[in-house]
């Protein structure tokens, strides 16, 4: 009798172990080993039938260009104003963070139900996903008022980057009338200037649901400025991504978009975030946004204009940097991007000269464009900020008559700095 009981317990235990291992082996598979690459979606009516506690899967990028799927639990569905959102939380304390916006949520059979769009302060395991039908424009959901934000307690998941631009410069710009162009600096990655993009991926590493992408407003010799997000779904030549607006101000005409390489993930109880790097793989152009996400057309070439900035100090050999600025539907946004790039280059240049000095040297800067010349004077640590302010607010605005609202085609700036 005792032997029979022991034998039954052993069989039961072994069975449970195999069942547990089998379940988790599926969850831990890379996404490309799971036969769910279809672009099928689940309608809102079907989503309404999901049961609380049902397991779904979040497709995310955590290493290189690989996509993995993580089990998540469906907590409910609710309509907030004109938004229809799925409430979910991750299993096994898996953390999500800035840059995951747009990551698709799928069923076990591979149908997409939503795209991650909101997270919570202080809790990196809970998130909300936008109903995929709304993101694709397949449902007549009235548009949110422009500039609307998620309710208190939540935050949007964009991850902005400003490589080659010092945080101090943007903090100062945030105190001017240009502040409405600036994203929340708490969710912006600052880094040393990048002289080039990352690696060139293989042809097999094309974007798909969960891939990290980088949209550039400014790119070139020193500065990379834009935002990271994730692909939600591909339909023919169109990538749907982000699950929310890229910017509340303006959309690029055709913003350059690159595949990004995940370097690491920064874990934090409050604001976890990705740490990617753009690759050299141009995947298309960002051409459209609304309150439910953005669209990237793979066959559309980027629309940019060149910015050449030549800097010199006390008559020394001048240096010239070339950057491409994304053409925008708003001339004001083009002016801001141009001014911020030129100001950042001047800032880096001056800080490099005065890195070991604590004195505040007076400097006069002569700024010349094709049609105008300006002279400004400031202290060594402040002159770059004033250059930026002058370029953004005065020089660029004066180059064209405001009523013409003419967009840029190219721009050359020469900034000669003299220390009396």
Image: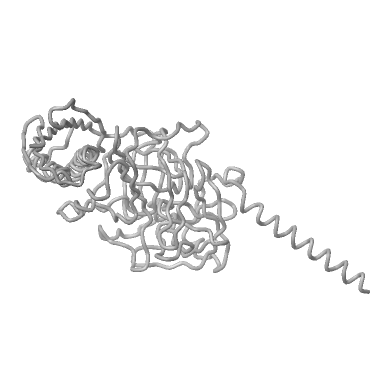
In this picture, residue 415 sits left or right of residue 161:
left
Using the rendered view, name the quadrant where residue 412 is placed.
top left
Position of 260 with respect to 250 (left or right) is: right
Residue 237 pos. (x, y %): 42, 38
**Residue 362 locus on image (x, y percent):** 10, 42
Colouring scheme applied when the structure was drawn: one colour
Task: Tell me if residue 329 can be seen.
Answer: no
For the N terminus, which image quadrant?
A: bottom right
**Residue 106 appears in the picture as rendered:** yes
Residue at the image point whose x is 79% and y is 61% from the top: 14
* Direction bottom: furthest residue: 1
Say which of 141 and 206 sits in front.
206
Quadrant housing the C terminus: top left
Q: Is residue 407 left or right of residue 148?
A: left
Q: Is residue 17 above or below residue 38?
A: below
Above or below 307: residue 157: below
User: What count of labels does the image hold?
Assistant: 0
Rendered image quadrant of residue 38? top right
Q: Nearer the viewer, residue 419 or 252?
A: 419
Between residue 4 and residue 55, name the one nearer to us: 4
Look at 47% across and 50% down and name the residue there.
265
- Residue 248: x and y in percent read 26, 53
- Please report the residue visible at 48 percent of the width from the left and 42 percent of the height from the top: 208
């Amino acid at each position: 009798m005792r032997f029979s009981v022991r034998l039954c317990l052993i069989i039961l235990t072994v069975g449970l172990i195999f069942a547990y291992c089998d379940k988790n082996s599926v969850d831990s598979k890379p996404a490309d080993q799971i036969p769910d690459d279809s672009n099928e979606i689940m309608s809102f009516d079907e989503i309404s039938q999901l049961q609380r506690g049902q397991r779904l899967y979040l497709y995310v990028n955590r290493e290189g260009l690989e996509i993995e799927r993580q089990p998540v639990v469906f907590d409910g569905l609710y309509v907030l104003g004109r938004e229809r959102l799925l409430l979910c939380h991750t299993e096994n304390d898996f953390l999500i963070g800035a840059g995951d916006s747009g990551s698709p949520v799928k069923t076990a059979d591979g149908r997409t139900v939503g795209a991650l769009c909101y997270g919570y302060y202080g809790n990196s395991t809970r998130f909300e996903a936008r109903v995929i039908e709304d993101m694709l424009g397949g449902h007549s959901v009235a548009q949110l008022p422009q500039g609307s934000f998620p309710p208190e307690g939540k935050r949007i998941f964009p991850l902005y980057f400003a490589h080659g631009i010092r945080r101090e410069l943007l903090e100062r710009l945030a105190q001017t009338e240009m502040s409405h162009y600036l994203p929340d600096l708490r969710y912006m990655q600052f880094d040393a200037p990048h002289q080039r993009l990352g690696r060139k991926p293989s042809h097999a590493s094309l974007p798909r649901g969960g891939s990290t992408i980088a949209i550039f407003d400014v790119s070139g010799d020193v500065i990379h400025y834009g935002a990271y997000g994730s692909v939600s779904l591909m339909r023919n030549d169109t990538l749907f991504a982000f699950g929310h607006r890229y910017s509340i101000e303006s959309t690029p005409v055709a913003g350059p978009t690159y595949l990004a390489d995940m370097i690491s993930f920064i874990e934090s109880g409050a604001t976890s975030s990705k740490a990617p790097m753009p690759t050299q793989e141009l995947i298309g152009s960002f051409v459209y946004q609304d309150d439910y996400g953005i669209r990237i057309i793979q066959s559309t070439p980027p629309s940019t204009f060149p910015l050449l900035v030549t800097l010199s100090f006390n008559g020394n050999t001048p240096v010239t940097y070339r950057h491409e600025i994304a053409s925008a539907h708003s001339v004001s946004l083009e002016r801001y991007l141009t001014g911020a790039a030129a100001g950042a280059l001047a800032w880096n240049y001056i800080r490099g000269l005065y890195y070991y000095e604590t004195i505040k040297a007076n400097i006069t800067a002569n700024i010349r464009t094709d049609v105008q010349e300006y002279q400004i004077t400031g202290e060594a640590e402040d002159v770059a900020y004033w250059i930026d302010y002058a370029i953004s607010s005065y020089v660029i605005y004066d180059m064209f008559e405001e009523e013409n609202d003419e967009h840029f085609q190219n721009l050359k700036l020469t900034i000669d700095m003299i220390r009396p």
